Amino acid sequence: MKPRTRHKAAMLIAAMLLLSGCGTTSNGGASDNGGMLTWQQANEEYKATVEDFPFALMNDDKFPANMPKAQSSSSLYAKGSGEGQAYFYWQCSVERNILDNSRTAPETARESLKQLRKLLDTDWFKNYYEDKDGIVENDVIGKSELGDYSTMRDFYNTDCTWYRQENGLAQ
């Protein structure tokens, strides 16, 4: 992955998942927070999303009971962050299945790529995931469909820390 692309992806993830220390109020941001969510509110968004998630996790994975907390208790989250945590967790589950099977079970990897492609049509992806350059579609999914898993592996290694921690996988 090009350094610029990796940096852009990392920045997108960071901005998407939480905006730390912005506009906090004396009650931790629960009211009058400019449309931002507290962790509790974002976690409720996460729980509602995983309760009725449209796609199955792979590898016998299960969604964690809660999304991860930011290091700062006063952190606020953008609307869609809880939903985004669920989609990122699912994406990591699918990417792991693709990467684990790309050499030994290519048909399984191809079927999983078809599942990952469904991400592009979700309301969450269309409304909250900024991918103007088509990196997810062209570089992560498209290159993998052609047998080049390097960009997907970079994204998985960079963006799936929470997923790997939850599943006891090596960092």
Image (cartoon, rainbow, N blue to C red):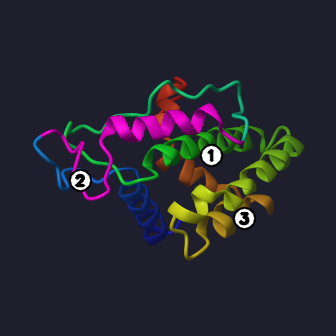
Residue at the image position 79 percent from the left and 60 percent from the top: 145
Question: Which residue is identified by label 3?
Answer: 143
The quarter holding residue 69 reads top left
Q: Give the range drawn in magenta.
A: 27-54
Q: Is residue 99 found left or right of 71 in the rendered image?
A: right
Q: Where is residue 149 in the image (x, y as percent from the top left)?
A: 69, 55
Residue 7 numbered mark, or none: none
Q: What element carries label 3?
A: helix
Q: Nearer the viewer, mark 2 or mark 3?
A: 2
Instruction: Indicate which disc, 3 or 1, sits on the residue closer to the N terminus.
Output: 1
Q: Which of marks 3 and 1 is in front?
A: 1
Q: How far apart are marks 2 and 3 (CA)?
A: 41 Å
Q: Is residue 161 visible?
A: no
Q: Nearer the viewer, mark 2 or mark 1?
A: 2
User: 69 or 9: nearer the eye?
Assistant: 69
Residue 31 falls within the magenta-colored stretch: yes
Instruction: Indicate which disc, 2 or 1, sits on the residue closer to the N terminus.
Output: 2
Q: Is residue 87 found left or right of 66 in the rendered image?
A: right
Amino acid on which the number 2 mark rests in the picture: Asn
The quarter holding residue 75 reads top left
Q: Where is residue 60 in the image (x, y as percent from the top left)?
A: 70, 24
Question: Which residue is identified by label 2?
Answer: 33
Question: Which residue is identified by label 1?
Answer: 91
Q: Is residue 75 found left or right of 55 in the rendered image?
A: left
Q: Residues within 10 Å of mark 2 (few under 14, many from 20)?
A: some
